[in-house]
Image (cartoon, rainbow, N blue to C red):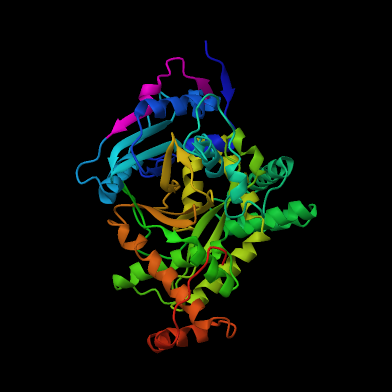
Amino acid sequence: MSQHEAMSKVDTAWLRMERPTNLMMISGVIVLERAIDVAALKKAVEARFLAFRRFRQRTVELAGQWFWETDETFDLNWHVRRAALPAPAGKAELQEYVSNLASSPLDTSKPLWQFHLIENYAGGGALVVRIHHCYADGIALVQVILSLTDSSANAKFHKPHSSSKLKQTGGTVFARLLAPAKHRVEHAAELVEAGLHKAIDWVRDPQSAAESLVETARTGTHEASAILRELGHVLTLADDPPTRFKGPLGVYKRVAWCDPLPLAEVKAVGKALDATVNDVLMACAAGALRAYLLARGDEIDGLSIRATIPVNLRPLEHAKDLGNHFGLVYLDLPIGMSNPVARLQAVRDGMNQLKSSRQALVSYGLLSLLGVGPGMLQRPVLELMSRKATAVATNVPGPPTPLFFCGVAISEMMFWVPQTGSIGMGVSILSYAGSVYFGLIVDSKLVPNPNEISQRFAPELEQLLLIALLHQGEQTITPASAEQLLIDAPEVRKRKARPKVSAGA
């Protein structure tokens, strides 16, 4: 008889968040230079993916509590599938295939993951992976997937190995900024739970709850006070403004991603404009969303929307333990700013403020509470929190050098994270082997064709790069000087040749 292993509170929260309108799956695509054999794929999965015993387990509910249970009828053939795209089997056909999978729930009677091998994509092959969020957070699943890859084409799958590639990448957006000890994270979760129990009516009256929390914070330790004050701040955040990106959700998701962009150019922009790579990429995402709305005649001057961004809350070397150990922070995306440099500076300033906040710890505590609280509480809590954001945004710095899967070179990688509650858009940014990939997953009722957004990402980066190159170190770049440069750009281009951007920029 199978033994049962209690599921953590936060993992339970992600399992219970699933709705027909928002499935809690993390999906990814690996594009291969040539097709691989399904037998080789199964061998790789058997040797390395299933070395993590969790992936042989399914979820079961007993007396209102969720557990992990080994699937005694486990069959690898169910989890590793072959597929073929309709001719001409290009990017549009792959996007349609991934969209269908992202809109289809996994079978809850089995372990919640699948690999779909496509043998006829663009002259090569592709692998679509989907794994339920309750198994692990994004940073852990990146490590799991990278453990299937090698740095050369002649590797053999004799035994599992633990990938060290993730540590070389620096992890997710805040991985180097926020990696507290486990006891601090759990203590924060306990504080949030206790604080909310003292303000039990917080869903109905967040303002009163926030005032109660602030009063409680006055008598606590410095850390406890800071966390409770942050919780009060989160509870009283205004709802995000209405745009065509928010509204009633359907049951079909569409995915899209842009062609790879040179990471060296992103670094060059960041260096010239005193910003991080992540600042530049998030500013480009804000610009792409702005351009899409403007093309539809929407009035967005001065408008700002929020994206929730995951923050890693554990050392990277512990990611192999799986589970969900991250919090969320709210980042303002200033889509109402027309000046690209001003927009970048606003994103940079917002990111800097978040680095010193306890929002990630607070949201982790909220997730912990949702994992043990009554189901009737979860829906209003999710709705309250999701009204405060328009999108989920994730940036994962991937391996800097090319990798191989089953002996075949990986040419591209992309992934998409799920959205919670009433949020209908996910923004994904991934760097791999010197390139950056920008992807979207959206509710088709809100954005019927997300390619119209993803294809606007490159022009946003090009505009910032043009500003950086035209200055060429002559002076500090300000929003005003950038605006004048864009006006003068045609004449300046005649006098200045665009220099080559090196990888070390």
Residue 26 appears at what percent x and percent y? 44, 42
The magenta stretch spans residue 263: no
Is residue 348 among what the camera can see? yes
Between 124 and 212, the residue placed more toward the observer is 124
Between 199 and 460, the residue placed more toward the observer is 460
- Occupied quadrant, residue 300: bottom left
Specify the farthest residue to the top: 1
Left or right position of 457 against 217: left
**Residue under the point 69% across and 53% down:** 227
Specify the farthest residue to the front: 154
Left or right position of 37 against 470: left
- Occupied quadrant, residue 130: top left
- Occupied quadrant, residue 237: bottom right
Residue bounds of the magenta highlight:
63-83
Residue 3 appears at what percent x and percent y? 56, 16
Residue 444 appears at what percent x and percent y? 30, 52
Between 154 and 120, the residue placed more toward the observer is 154
Is residue 273 among what the camera can see? no
User: In the figure, 82 relative to 90: above or below?
Assistant: above
**Residue under the point 51% across and 64% down:** 264
**Residue under the point 31% across and 31% down:** 82
> In which quadrant will I find the C terminus?
bottom right
Residue 148 appears at what percent x and percent y? 49, 34
**Residue under the point 46% across and 85% down:** 485
The magenta stretch spans residue 65: yes
User: In the figure, 64 relative to 331: above or below?
Assistant: above
Between 132 and 205, the residue placed more toward the observer is 132
Left or right position of 204 against 427: right
